[in-house]
Image: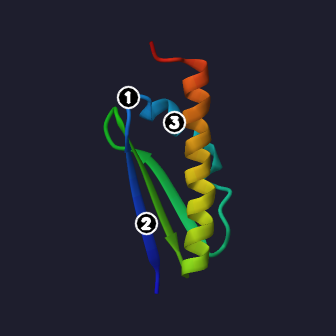
Amino acid sequence: MTHTAVFRFATPDAHALYLSVCQEMGDVGGRSSVRVELAGDDLLVLDVNAADIPALRAALNTWLRLITIAVEMRELAVPSG
């Protein structure tokens, strides 16, 4: 049985975030796969598939952390206001 989680991040910085995390896509374990893509100008899509729940949790922890760090670095580099 395959387990899947899909997250959609609506942000004007979607392209910058995509460029920050897409280079990590080849760095996934054998029990999970990850796809990151842009859907339009302001939507980043994270699609995670895994063979089991622990692998899904581990992949989500990694990828959500990567995206969070990218958002935080973007906020530091380009402060709003």
Q: Nearer the viewer, residue 10 or 19?
A: 10
The image shows residue 81 at horizontal and vertical percentages of 44, 12
The image shows residue 44 at horizontal and vertical percentages of 41, 43
Looking at the rendered structure, the secondary structure element under dot 3 is: helix
Q: Which residue is mark 1?
A: 12
Looking at the rendered structure, the secondary structure element under dot 2 is: strand
* Residue drawn at 64 percent across, 49 percent down: 24
Q: Is residue 64 visible?
A: yes
**CA gap, disc 2 to disc 1?**
23 Å
The image shows residue 23 at horizontal and vertical percentages of 62, 44
**CA gap, disc 2 to disc 3?**
19 Å
62 lies left or right of 56: right
* Residue drawn at 33 percent across, 43 percent down: 39
Q: Inspect the image, locate mark 3, and give the three-letter code of the amino acid beneath it.
A: Leu
Q: Earlier in the sequence, mark 2 or mark 1?
A: 2
The image shows residue 21 at horizontal and vertical percentages of 58, 43
Residue 66 to residue 15: above or below: below
Mark 3 burial class by Cα count in 10 Å: few <14, some 14-19, many 20+? many
Q: Which residue is mark 3?
A: 17
Please tell me in which quadrant of the rendered image residue 59 appears: bottom right
Single out the residue that lies furthest toward the left: 40
Q: Earlier in the sequence, mark 2 or mark 3?
A: 2
Please tell me in which quadrant of the rendered image residue 42 appears: top left
Q: Which residue is mark 2?
A: 5
* Residue drawn at 40 percent across, 55 percent down: 7
**CA gap, disc 3 to disc 1?**
10 Å
Single out the residue that lies furthest toward the top: 81
Q: Inspect the image, locate mark 2, and give the three-letter code of the amino acid beneath it.
A: Ala
Please tell me in which quadrant of the rendered image residue 28 appears: bottom right
